[in-house]
Image (cartoon, rainbow, N blue to C red):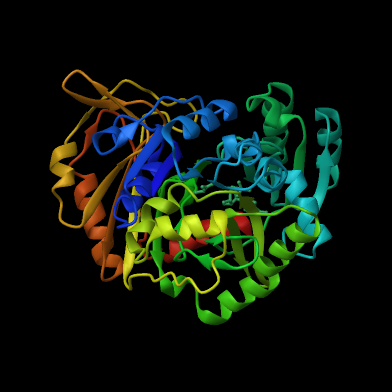
Amino acid sequence: MKILVIGGGGREHAMVWKLVQSAAVEKVWCAPGNDGIAQEIECVPLDLKDVKAAADLAEKLGADLTVAGPELPLTLGIADEFARRGLTLLGPARKAAQLEGSKIFSKQFMERHGIPTAAVYGICESAAEAYRALEAVKWPLVIKADGLAAGKGVLVTESPEEARQFVGRVMEKREFGEAGGRVLLEEGLAGEELSYIILTDGKDFLRMAPARDHKRAFDNDEGPNTGGMGVYSIDEILPAALEQKIIETIVRPTLAGLAAEGLPYRGFLYFGLMLTAAGPKVLEYNCRLGDPETEAVLLRADFDLAQACMLAARSSLAGFEAKWLPGASVCVVIASKGYPENPQTGVAIQGLEDAAKTPGAVVFHAGTRKSSGGFCTNAGRVLVVSAAGENLASARRQAYDAVRRIHIEGAHYRSDIGKPRSAKGRAVAENRNA
Ligand code: AMP
Ligand code: GLY
């Protein structure tokens, strides 16, 4: 099997890392990839916005399967383009990718299909409308830019002043561009979050090991929302009864809803869940694997990912069993100085070789490029350092052991990924969400 992976971040590095372990895989390319991935496999230039160029590339390379990593090409119709040309791609068509591409589309989809989610306070088409709507909401309030904003277009707040400022940034200053043309105002939910990710052929599905992301920039869930600062995966966060409930009330109704609306779905589907006192509720859908969930979860995957992807893309997952290693995995994101608001790039990275020698640890490149004599930072999220262990404590120890060997001037990472939360930490988080 020859596989082309589209994308160039830590998630794609982890996918490549896993795919090349498959006995059925002869060749893997990554487009555009990054200089870290290029140390392992061939990377090919590609503009992620150009879905025609992606299909040209798959044709030219003779890829048997193309796997789309990030949301952008999916929301731009990469799957539609491949289908038109009879090329095999894993990922939903443009219309179904709206589950991620438009928070308003996904909210209305959930309402149509009775899928538990936060109550809507308003859907606003202009800043004036949003300011008016703010007069009649309950607090804490969540404001979401409708379109893609790399995880940063969401504000959870109890402050009317902060809410007004955010509306101004999103709808008037257009900090997230077109994504801020409409906003969704919704109920703030309280609870622990869970990333539940499936791979589906539209009917049958297998699930990834359960994972918990850390969206806030700093320890104890302080600071702004980011694309994700680190993840841990252990089975204990998903007891069997909870999983059953998630499947019955969320996963099955979502797959049935997609089918009923004529939106066939082959690919990864990510349910961002809040485990509330009233049961699991959907915060968001993503039409792809999570980043950085993938960098933690794939360390526990004990099955042939290439085969699973091919089955989901082309035939059926019925009868395919995905095994997961017991124990735990953890990944820690090392972010540039200034991330998420204003990340600094071009800063030298030291200690990569030393980190790679840490027993059990794997260093995935998210936003790096080669510079004289080594690597430097090239994006907000720079490296994702992962480790698996027999329990959470050992996975954490190994991951942080490797993290501490890496030096990037001004960079930051969270030191509490997978750490049992203190009563104080919980109180802070609950107070914000309650
Ligand atoms: P989203 O991109 O919609 O997942 O939002 C990003 C993050 O914002 C989530 O992972 C949550 O931490 C938070 N969030 C989103 N929606 C809500 C909500 N209704 N209540 C509380 N927190 C939320
Ligand atoms: N880690 C959250 C996401 O991939 O959107």
Classify residue 345 as left or right of residue 212.
Answer: left
Residue at image coords 63%, 42%: 83
Apparent side of residue 249 relative to residue 230 in the rendered image (left or right): right
The residue under the point 44% across, 40% down is: 63
Q: Pick the residue in front: 131 or 379.
A: 379
Q: Is residue 50 above or below residue 324?
A: above
Q: Quadrant of the C terminus?
A: bottom right
Q: Is residue 315 left or right of residue 94?
A: left
Q: Is residue 17 left or right of residue 144?
A: left
Q: Is residue 243 above or below residue 225?
A: below
Q: Nearer the viewer, residue 234 or 409?
A: 234
Residue 116 appears in which quarter of the rendering? bottom right
User: Of residues 387 and 125, which is closer to you in this image?
Assistant: 387
Depth check: give the residue in front, 295 or 136: 295
Q: Position of residue 190 (x, y in %)?
A: 62, 62
For the question of whether residue 31 can be seen, the reply is yes
- Residue 138 is at least partly visible in this image: no
Q: State the image coordinates of residue 3 (x, y, percent, origin top left).
A: 41, 44
Residue 49 position, x and y percent, is 57, 27
Q: Is residue 102 above or below residue 271?
A: above
Residue farthest top in this picture: 372
Where residue 164 sits: x, y (%)? 73, 33
